[in-house]
Image (cartoon, rainbow, N blue to C red):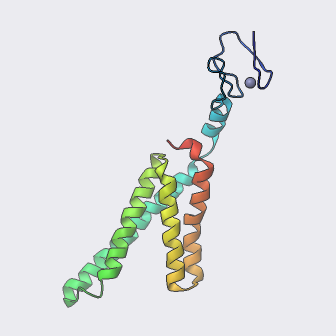
Amino acid sequence: MNTCPKCKLVNPPDAVRCDCGYDFSSGKMAASYLHGKTAQNLSFSLGTVYACLCFFGCLVAAWFITRILLHATQTGDWRAGASPLVAFVFMIIVWSLTGVAILRRKKYAITLSYVGAGIALLGIIARGIVPLDIILALPSFAIVFYLRNRSDLLT
Ligand SMILES: [Zn+2]
């Protein structure tokens, strides 16, 4: 029998790693199997919902882009719509990347969630404190903490 020096749990003689994460061959602490199981049991449904929100946001932005382009072609005035056009294209890029990263459970989804939260914060500062802006920005702040807590699920 193999008694773990870290947690004193008696392991079978052929055990490679104790439940606590102690590795018998290297004598070092490694990621616990139990911890891994718990991580897999963590729900990721909110992440999926947020990814869908991102794609929905892309559709809304695309609709605004179409309207701006239509208005510009009708009036011939391309200048007025230029900056919102750039902003909406940028949002589509950020949101679609975030949505795909979350669905594929990539670690860089956390970085992208910071970018999204940063943009939401900039929007609040730029437009003044509008309650609607804050309500709309809340999910982008929440997802940062959500993804950070589930970083074990991301690769
Ligand atoms: Zn142990």
How far across and how far down the image is residue 130, in percent? 57, 84
How far across and how far down the image is residue 78, in percent? 23, 85
Q: Quadrant of residue 89?
A: bottom left
Q: Foreground residue, 33 or 41?
A: 33
How far across and how far down the image is residue 109, in percent? 48, 53
Quarter that holds the N terminus? top right
Q: Residue at x 46, y 49 (%)?
A: 103
In the displayed structure, does residue 87 sit left or right of residue 24? left
Q: Foreground residue, 62 or 90?
A: 90
Q: Residue at x 40, y 68 (%)?
A: 91
Q: Quadrant of residue 9?
A: top right
In the displayed structure, does residue 112 sit left or right of residue 147? left
Q: Residue at x 57, y 59 (%)?
A: 143
The quadrant of the picture showing ligand 1 is top right
Residue 59, can we see it?
no
Q: Residue at x 66, y 35 (%)?
A: 35
Vertical position of residue 80 compared to residue 20: above or below:
below
How far across and how far down the image is residue 108, in percent? 47, 51
